[in-house]
Image (spheres, grey):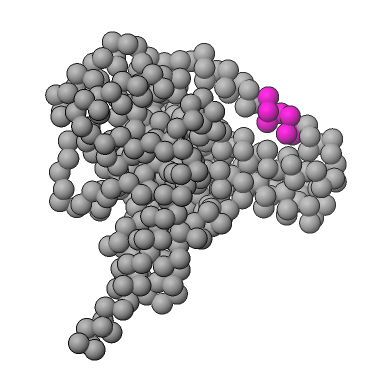
Amino acid sequence: MTQTYTALAQTVRDRGLLSRTRWFYGLLLIGLGLALGGVVTGVILLDDSWLQLLMAAALGVLLTQLAFVGHEASHRQVLSSGPANDRLGWFLAVVCVGMSYSWWMNKHTRHHGNPNKLGKDPDIEIDTFSFEEESAATRRGFKAWFTRRQGLFFFPLLLLEGINLHLKSVQSLWENRTVAGRRLELTVLVARLAIYLTAVFWMLPLGMAFAFVGLQVAVFGLYMGASFAPNHIGMPIVGREEKLDFFTKQVRTSRNVSGGWWATALMGGLNYQIEHHLFPSMPRPHLAIARRMVLEHCRRHEVDYAENNLLAAWGIVIGYLNRVGLSARDSFRCPIASELR
């Protein structure tokens, strides 16, 4: 399969699908910038009207869209040089969104190298949720009760994911003192938060200001989590000692979301997760073309290619998390059952 992937990759390069599309990202960033200006103008003009909550929700959506572009910059999809992409990604993540770029890069790079692999992929490490049975079986007490029902809690708790991302960013920089540019990143994150909160609480009545910030962060977390969740949750887990070639590993563990251009706009290109994992530096406008090539390649070589519509993908995520959660129940019952025997 390695040789056939090499041939596919060469065809992709010959078609120019790895070349930059600066025009697209230029227009996209201009559009997002104008939309942000519109939100700021709306906040000023609406004064103390509860319609401000519409501005808060819009801000949450726009910050998520900026995070998508920051993600693409981190993969060298936007600009020609690596340093230029890093500078753009850093600005979008730290200054605009309020997330640590260095923390994201470290975590996401490890994920791409070993998606859904036990002991290697940080995205399936045990945290609030258990993404595989091995970790679910270690839960006890309230955590076990929660894990058994974790699929039902998944999307409601994504409303808190924005807070989690901001806190994890600061925590990672505070604890890891070896990160290059750590002090600058911490300073900018704190300054951004201070400026944002000062502006909101200065312009709006106290209760409305709390509602504005709460809704904005909730929309941001829900949008981010709901966009990334279908990518790998519910796809096969790769064992600790299991060895797979690059093509099989990336395709087997990833899921696409159908829907064409609207899904691409909604999810920032994450809907083409298989192609993104096979060709991480491919710009967003080229992913749909690559999909047809990869799908044909998978059919020819009898490799499963997972693709679902968005609602079905979310349903798979919830069902999978609940099935994994049953491991917490079974592991709790096993000791009692063994004593009875």
Q: Answer left or right for 240 relative to 216.
A: left
Q: Position of residue 148 (x, y in %)?
A: 41, 67
Residue 340 visible, this angle: yes
Residue 81 visible, this angle: no
Q: Position of residue 118 (x, y in %)?
A: 25, 53
Who's the residue at 47% across and 47% down the image?
314
Residue 320: name its quadrant.
bottom left
Who's the residue at 30% across and 29% down the image?
278
Work out whether 282 lies above or below 305: above
Q: Position of residue 41 (x, y in %)?
A: 78, 32
Q: Position of residue 300 (x, y in %)?
A: 21, 25
Please tell me whether residue 231 belongs to the stretch shown in magenta. no
Prevailing secondary structure class for the magenta stretch in the rendered image: helix
Quarter of the picture containing the N terminus is top left
Q: Answer left or right for 269 relative to 64.
A: left
Please tell me whether residue 39 belongs to the stretch shown in magenta. yes
Who's the residue at 25% across and 28% down the image?
298
Magenta range is 34-40
Work out whether 177 lies above or below 248: below
Pick the front one: 316 or 41: 316
Residue 255: name its quadrant.
top left
Work out whether 16 lies above or below 174: above
Quarter of the picture containing the C terminus is bottom left
Who's the residue at 41% across and 77% down the image?
141
Number of numbered callouts drawn: 0
Q: Answer left or right for 319 relative to 112.
A: right
